[in-house]
């Protein structure tokens, strides 16, 4: 029972490089989310999706792009990484109603 | 704007103590309130979810209460153990601010350390 799986778990990038973070869920959830967690800031929503083929901006979307081509996958892209994007990134999925969100174990990203 | 505050930011207690973690929110228009646990280097695990119409939820040694009108929730941990050491996060799902799409607004967490 995998739940929400994030890859990679760790990554170090140089400023200006690009990369894609992958999130996969096996619970057939419609809703998926990308958060970043920074010391003293808590979790902040970057982008989210309410179903296959849809995306929407969250609280801190600048510098990121997302895609949801398949229901089970939600991709987060950094086109030109900046040191301010050094963070821990979490993906979550949600079914409906009063169910809780399910989180992956995170991707620790450092931008040098 | 909905804001969620957790006090204290950190707490250290000896094993066996009963303890209370606090969460407050500024707008009472919520679908539910959730408590999560986060272990170092790990993701969030849902502990308890209280619907807006409920007053409390219990799971084992954990009891969470909700007073929506005053914008407060507490997480009570009975007979604390070293294995309870983690960061505890409170989150509300507001009826606006994207809450209909399941969006959550998180507090910054309380880091709990239970000493043997």
Image (cartoon, coloured by chain):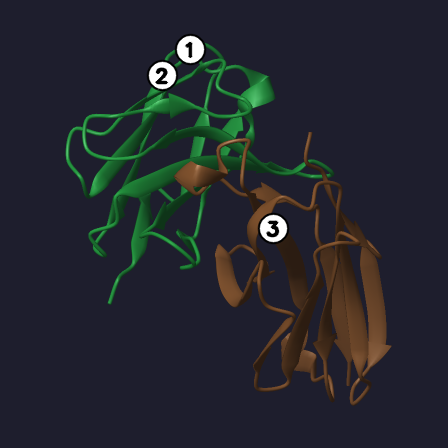
Chain colours: A green, B brown
The residues bearing labels 1 and 2 have C-alpha atoms spaced at a distance of 5 Å
Query: Residue at horizontal 73%, vertical 84%?
Result: B80
Q: For the C terminus of chain A, which image quadrant?
A: top right
The numbered disc on residue A69 is none
Query: Residue at horizontal 43%, vertical 43%?
Result: B102
Residue A54 location (% of width, % of height): 25, 25
Q: Chain of mark 2?
A: A
Q: Chain of mark 1?
A: A
From this view, report whether residue B91 is shown above or below residue B88. Answer: above
Relative depth, front residue between B41 and A26: A26
**Callout 3 and callout 1 share a chain:** no
Relative depth, front residue between A5 and B67: B67
Q: Chain of mark 3?
A: B
The residues bearing labels 2 and 3 have C-alpha atoms spaced at a distance of 32 Å
From this view, report whether residue A15 is shown above or below residue A75. Answer: above
Q: Residues within 10 Å of mark 1 (few under 14, many from 20)?
A: some
Residue identified by numbered label 3: B91
Q: Secondary structure at mark 3?
A: strand
Whether residue B22 sits left or right of residue B59 in the image: it is right
Give the total of numbered labels. Answer: 3
Label 1 close to label 2 by CB (< 8 Å) = yes
Whether residue B40 sits left or right of residue B10 in the image: it is left
The numbered disc on residue A18 is 2
The residues bearing labels 3 and 1 have C-alpha atoms spaced at a distance of 31 Å
Residue identified by numbered label 1: A80
Q: For the N terminus of chain A, which image quadrant?
A: bottom left
Residue A64 location (% of width, % of height): 42, 18
Q: Secondary structure at mark 1?
A: loop
């Amino acid at each position: 029972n995998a739940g929400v799986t994030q890859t990679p778990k760790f990554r170090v990038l140089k400023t200006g490089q690009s990369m894609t973070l992958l999130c996969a869920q096996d619970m057939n959830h419609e809703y998926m989310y990308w958060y970043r967690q920074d010391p003293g800031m808590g979790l902040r929503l970057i982008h989210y999706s309410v179903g296959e083929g849809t995306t929407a901006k969250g609280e801190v979307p600048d510098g990121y792009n997302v895609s949801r081509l398949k229901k089970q996958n939600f991709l987060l892209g950094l086109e030109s990484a900046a040191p301010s994007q050094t963070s821990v990134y979490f993906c979550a999925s949600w079914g409906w109603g009063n169910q809780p969100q399910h989180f992956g174990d995170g991707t620790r990203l450092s931008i040098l | 704007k909905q804001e969620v505050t957790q006090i204290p930011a950190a707490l250290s207690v000896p094993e066996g103590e009963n303890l209370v973690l606090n969460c407050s929110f500024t707008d009472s228009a919520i679908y539910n309130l959730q408590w999560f646990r986060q272990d170092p280097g790990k993701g969030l695990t849902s502990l308890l979810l209280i619907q807006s119409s409920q007053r409390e939820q219990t799971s084992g040694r954990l009891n969470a209460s909700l007073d929506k009108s005053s914008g407060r929730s507490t997480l009570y941990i009975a007979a604390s153990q070293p294995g309870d050491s983690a960061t505890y996060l409170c989150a509300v799902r507001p009826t606006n601010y994207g809450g209909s799409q399941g969006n959550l607004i998180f507090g910054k967490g309380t880091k709990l350390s239970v000493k043997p």
